Amino acid sequence: MSPHDPPRTPDTATSPDAAVRARPSVLAAHAVLCAVGTVFFLGSFAYPWTTVEDGTVGPGALPRVAGLALALIGALMLLREMRTGTILEGDGHVEEDSEHAAEEQRTVRRKLIVVSITIVCAGALIPFLGMLPTLALLTLFLTLRVERLRPPVALAASFGVLVVCYLLFVVLLRVPLPLGVFDPALWSAP
């Protein structure tokens, strides 16, 4: 190794010194992404690509495009992991030789459990609060409690999610979202 060579780090997949191999958990995650994308792509053929009345984008367009993209990205990530393996900084992999390995592993597991429970609770709230308020509350909770962002930043992120989802799904795509207690038909019934 000459003095002009860049320093090598043993924790990157590009380093020749690293003994990197495919991790089964990462392979499984990428295979699941690929499978979910394939299911959505194939299921989208049950719906028309365009609407017959006015020729606008139909209900099959979004799941077809998103499913195909997810399947392709999952397949590429799966191939990359099988060929070279990866250990990237920030991907949740905790090195065993770290002095804080046990505490870091507990933190990662605790975050995973909190996020999983929160998503299930958010799914249960959708029929009552509606989709958009639930997404905003989900974002607020996760940014405050899991990511530990400051309250003004968490509120801004939550409001941003609300606005972007409204513009994307309600205004642009005209998707009828569950409104929950905010449904005007609920309050205007005699």
Image (spheres, rainbow, N blue to C red):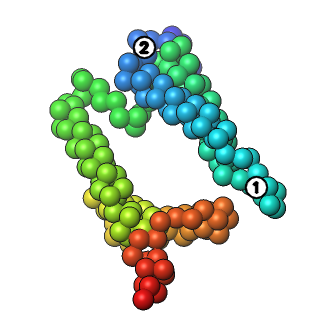
Image point (66%, 52%), residue name: 59
Q: Quadrant of the C terminus?
A: bottom left
The front one of 75 and 38 is 38
Whether 190 is drawn above or below 159: the answer is below
Residue 121 appears in the rendering:
yes
Amino acid tagged 2: Arg
Left or right: 161, with 128 as reference point = right
Image point (72%, 47%), residue name: 48
What percent of the width, then of the height, locates residue 102? Answer: 17, 32
What residue sits right under mark 1 in the picture?
51
What percent of the width, then of the height, locates residue 97? Answer: 24, 23
What residue sits right under mark 2 in the picture?
21
Whether 73 is drawn above or below 127: the answer is above
Left or right: 10, with 124 as reference point = right
Image point (50%, 15%), residue name: 82
Residue 13 appears in the rendering:
no
Q: In the rendered image, which quarter is residue 98 located in?
A: top left
What percent of the width, then of the height, locates residue 100? Answer: 20, 34
Question: Tag 1's secondary structure?
Answer: loop
Question: How far, Cα to Cα, is label 2 from label 1?
Answer: 48 Å
What percent of the width, then of the height, locates residue 9? Answer: 43, 23
Looking at marks 2 and 1 on the same chain, the residue that comes earlier in the sequence is marked by 2
Question: Tag 2's secondary structure?
Answer: loop
